Amino acid sequence: MTSPADTTGDVDDAASAGPQVFTWFSSDGARVEQARIAPTGSELRVRGRLVEAGTPERPAFTLTYDVVVDDEGQAREIALESERAEDSRSLTLRYDGGDAWLATTGAGESERIGTSGVTEVLIAGSMAFFSLAVRANGLHRAPDEVSRTALSVEAYDLAVSDTPMSFRSDDSMVHGITGEAATSAHVDAEGFVLDVPGSIERR
């Protein structure tokens, strides 16, 4: 699953390569995302920014994220901020280890969200979050398939909802389907997206 470019290193541990910075560009020039992946002890820290130009359907915005991933590949804490012309919004999601997520807004309001047992969090269009789902389920190691419910966060306004998630890997690609989008991507040996043919390219 490492076409078009192969990578080397420990398949099971992104920390083996030390800190890395990945940048993904959309083919139409409307979106760019950059993420820094760095080991912190037995965990990974993923910090990034997604910038989207305005379209007739949606004004321009910037999403920043800071994710703590545990030694089992699961995101445990996610801090998000969406900046738009009219305002900015922030949201922190914390997994309590007991099959529940606690969502806290920038105003300090907190509530438990999501169906019991939900562990994945997805953001439509984010290659970093797609990669984390691939890694959490080991889909970069061998062909496999997983279907479950995930939390979906809308990058523009940080609205959160449950969404069906189905990921499948074969010998060349990982295919992900959610309630919002379908994506087929080449990933590297550590599970991070290399490209979505005709749509996204990592440089």
Image: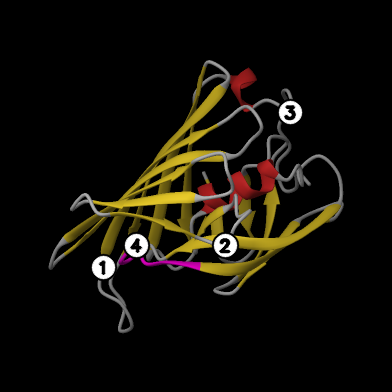
Spatial CA distance of label 4 from label 1 is 14 Å
In the rendered image, which residue does mark 4 sit on?
A: 158
Q: Position of residue 114 (x, y in %)?
A: 51, 61
Task: Looking at the image, tell me whether mark 4 or mark 1 is earlier in sequence order.
Answer: 1
| Circle 2: residue type | Thr
Q: Nearer the viewer, residue 116 or 55?
A: 116
Front of the two marks 3 and 1: 3
Q: Which residues are magenta?
A: 156-161
Q: Nearer the viewer, residue 147 or 96?
A: 96
Task: Looking at the image, tell me whether mark 1 or mark 2 is earlier in sequence order.
Answer: 1
In the rendered image, which residue does mark 2 sit on?
A: 115
| Circle 1: residue type | Ala
Element assignment for label 4: loop
Spatial CA distance of label 2 from label 4 is 18 Å
Badge 3, how many Cα within 10 Å: few under 14, some, many 20+?
Answer: some
Front of the two marks 1 and 2: 2
Q: Position of residue 134 (x, y in %)?
A: 68, 48
| Circle 4: residue type | Leu
Which mark, residue 12?
3
Task: Looking at the image, tell me whether mark 3 or mark 4 is earlier in sequence order.
Answer: 3
Q: Is residue 181 visible?
A: yes
Is the magenta region chiefly helix, strand or loop? loop
Which mark, residue 76?
none
| Circle 3: residue type | Asp
Badge 1, how many Cα within 10 Å: few under 14, some, many 20+?
Answer: some
User: Vertically, is 137 above or below 7?
Assistant: below
